[in-house]
Amino acid sequence: MSSMGPEPLADGFGRVHRDLRISVTDRCNFRCSYCMPAEGLDWLPRHEVLSYEEITRVARLCVERFGFDGIRLTGGEPTLRADLPRLVAQLSGLGVDLALTTNGTTLRSGAAELRAAGLTRINISCDSLRPDRFATITRRDDLDRVLDGIDAALDAGLSPVKINVVAMRGVNDDELLDFVQFGRDKGVTIRFIEFMPLDAQGEWSNDKVLSRDEIIATIDARFPLEAVEAQGSAPAERWRHRDGAGEIGVIASVTHAFCDTCDRVRLTADGMLRHCLFATRELDLRSLLRGGANDDTIAAAIRAEVGAKWAGHQINRVHFIRPARSMSQIGG
Ligand code: SAM
Ligand code: SF4
């Protein structure tokens, strides 16, 4: 590292990158229809998955060389990876904002240990509050476990707890108000995510996307909202309840892409660095890590990869190309 301290990781459009999304596994105990086929996917062989030491080396380098200040762990289902608190403890030692995205199924037994290891923030995915529908969407009859996991996260003192809801037309669009009421009752923030073309089966279509504007109009009619001012590089746009009962968020990746302010890079479970969720290229960091490359070489490779980042994804354009890997294989 230069004596001048971290040197920001800028791309050709002047966007500075400070946020690292790390997928710790491609495996999952759910089979959400918008993400994976019922039979699952071909899981990575164990030796292709980065060790916690390899992950921590990349994370440390991003923090020390480039001044990264946020790390989010995801997957697949990250809490399925053995001894996840050990990784959390290693990463929390870097002094960054550390968060986790999970389907919530393991939190009753695991939340307190994650909190003790240094995790602060958590996002829990839940796309229906109706048991039958939840089972249809996830192909697992586990709504009670997920709801109990949300309570376990709150009991463990994780804060904030946010609930991710993929909003899909004809699937759960009649539950928007139920979710908002749930968030108000529990004191958690609900974040609606527009359905993105990253399902493994390729069944996404534009007409299944429930748009940000439709979501906000429906909620505002029942629970009056006001927009919260621009939030830098955060993907979620925020609205607060006019009566003071908290906030909601929308991640409008499809209808209002936030590529202009993107500050994220992603590390897949098998050690590929991606400059965009939708990127059609990857940098093979695992080969560098295992081939004995020093930190200077790895940092230069990351800088070159991010330097080649495109202006933004092209969903809704005729020339949009789906990435070869799906959401659970990249790390959402
Ligand atoms: N298994 C964990 C979970 O479900 O929270 C973490 C990984 S999952 C891939 C991360 C997030 O991506 C979840 O909130 C999930 O709902 C979301 N997601 C998956 N496929 C999606 C898609 N096609 N469009 C929008 N969001 C999606
Ligand atoms: Fe698993 Fe998360 Fe994908 Fe659902 S969205 S199948 S929980 S990785």
Image: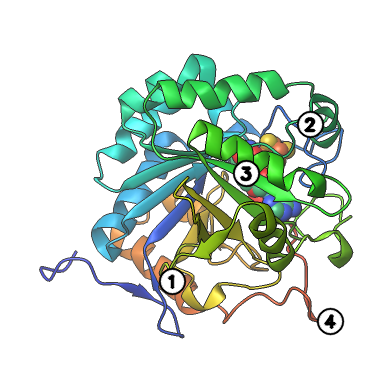
Query: Which residue extends farthest top?
Result: 109
Give the residue number, with chain letter if any, for mark 2: 134
Height in image: 110 above or below 328?
Answer: above
Question: Of the residues tagged 4 and 2, which is closer to the observer?
Answer: 2
What amino acid does circle 1 point to? Answer: Ala
Give residue 251's position: percent from left, percent from top.
60, 60
Ligand 2 located in image quadrant: top right
Residue at disc 3, CB closer than 8 Å to ligand 1: no
Going 77% across and 38% down the picture, which residue do you hit? 32
Q: Residue 319, image x and y in percent?
A: 80, 81
Point out the tag, 3 or 4, that comes first from the N-terminus.
3
- The Cα–Cα distance between marks 3 and 1, rounded to whole angstroms, is 22 Å
Residue 53 is left or right of residue 321, and the answer is left
Residue closer to the observer: 131 or 266: 131
- Gap between marks 3 and 2 measured at Cα: 17 Å
Q: How far apart are marks 1 and 4 (CA)?
A: 30 Å
Q: Which label number is shown at residue 180?
A: 3
Tell me if 26 is positioned left or right of 20 in this view.
right
Residue 230's tag is 1
Q: Which of marks 4 and 2 is nearer the N terminus?
A: 2
